[in-house]
Amino acid sequence: MISKKFLLAGSACALFTVITTLIVHLVQFPASTFDERLLLSNDTTYITRNVLTILHCIAVAISMGALAHARRNKAGGSLMTYGAVAFLIFSITEIVRMLLALIFINGLRKQYLSVTDEALRDQIKFVLEFQWPLANTVLFTLFILAFGFGCLFMGLGMIDRSKKFDRIFGLLFVFWSVQSFVVIGNNSLGWNLDTIIFWLSITFQPAMRATAAIWLFKESQLNFRTQVKESSPAHR
């Protein structure tokens, strides 16, 4: 049985991610130098944004899980379940990355500012400037890949529907997956598409999340009416 409460929770989470998507992409920090990055350890806005990113990832996992749940045992349901698993991997990866930044990296930044031993400061700086960027890139690439495959499977599952709106929604998910893979190419191959990616992030992404919220709400009402109808005496 499809859970109406889960679909409504997913709808609320999708709506929440509309706001968090805009915050995550619009709130920037002037931290282009090592000294500026050190100060992020005590920057309330930076810390708040990273915490919001964690909440965003949790909400994404719930909303995408709800999308898959709505199509359980129906056309495209298996593909959408794969998509939900990929989104779960995406969420876990990004949460780990944010926790590392908030606890481990910010901890090292504070240590660097407090210690006087130059040898220790050099060791900390090496981790912050050379090792962390590599680890961060690995985690970021994994989370983008997971997101891309999540969108791809979710889209293919939605396309395998009779409703025209669902097929269009599915095609937009597939486009979203292509956008995600382009981000990897842009970062690794220097395609110089930063401006296009940024504008898609603050327009297309929120629009897709808002559409998911509406879709889940409508599905919750549809499934509720179907269950009530099936439980009526006329259908027993």
Image (tube, rainbow, N blue to C red):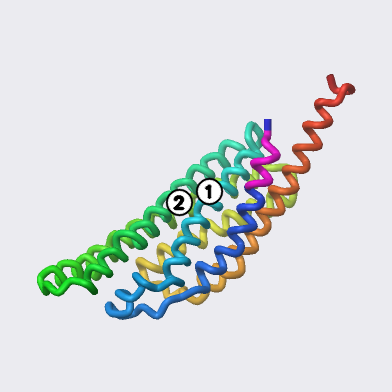
Q: Position of residue 53 (x, y in %)?
A: 48, 60
Q: Quadrant of the C terminus?
A: top right
Q: Is residue 155 above or below residue 103?
A: above
Q: Quadrant of the N terminus?
A: top right
Residue at the (60%, 64%) spot, across then down: 19
Q: Amino acid at mark 1?
A: Ala
Q: CA distance from mark 2 to mark 1?
A: 8 Å
* Mark 2 vs 1: CB contact within 8 A: yes
Q: Is residue 2 above or below residue 167?
A: above
**The stretch drawn in magenta includes residue 154:** no
Label 1 sits on residue: 61
Q: Position of residue 115 (x, y in %)?
A: 18, 71
Residue at the (73%, 52%) spot, across then down: 165
Residue at the (50%, 54%) spot, across then down: 57
Q: Earlier in the sequence, mark 2 or mark 1?
A: 1
In-image side of 29 versus 23 (left or right): left
In-image side of 26 versus 213 (left or right): left
Label 2 sits on residue: 90
Give the main secondary structure, helix, strand or loop, of the magenta stretch.
helix
Badge 1 element? helix
Residue at the (55%, 52%) spot, across then down: 59
Q: Which label is found at residue 46?
A: none
Q: Quadrant of residue 162?
A: top right
Q: Position of residue 5 (x, y in %)?
A: 68, 40
Magenta residues?
2-9
Q: Quadrant of residue 129?
A: bottom left
**Circle 2 Cα neighbour tier, 10 Å, few/some/many (<14 / 14–19 / ≥20):** many
